[in-house]
Image (cartoon, grey):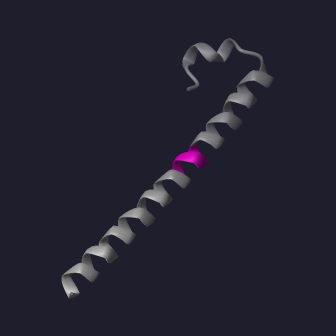
Amino acid sequence: MISIEDADLPRELIENRIKDTGKQIERFENFIESLKLRKKKYEEKLAKMDGE
């Protein structure tokens, strides 16, 4: 996380932290999408069980 104390850091380090944070956001978004897909599969399985 970038904090107020990081304001003293060189520009390159701050830019790297911004990139790293962007990558973390992307990983979390991918993780959330995988959870949504898993939930959907479970819902489909439950609906199939209810239909039997």
Closer to the camera in the image, 29 or 8: 29
Q: Residue at x 38, y 70 (%)?
A: 40
Rendered-image quadrant of the N terminus: top right
Q: Quadrant of residue 47?
A: bottom left
**Span highlighted in magenta in the image:** 25-29
Considering only vertical position in the picture, is 4 above or below 41? above
Q: Percent from the top left, x then y, of residue 24?
A: 59, 40
Residue 28 falls inside the magenta stretch: yes
* Position of residue 17 in the picture relative to residue 50 (left or right): right
**Above-or-below relation of 2 to 6:** below
**Residue 50 percent across, percent down from the top left:** 19, 82
Residue occupying the point 67% across, 34% down: 20
Image coordinates of residue 18 in percent, x first then y, are 67, 34
Q: Residue at x 75, y 22 (%)?
A: 13
Picture quarter containing residue 11?
top right
In depth, the one of 40 and 9 nearer the eye is: 40
Q: Which residue lies furthest to the front in this view?
A: 52
Asked whether, in this view, residue 36 is left or right of residue 16, the answer is: left
- The reply, left or right, for residue 15 in relation to residue 5 is right
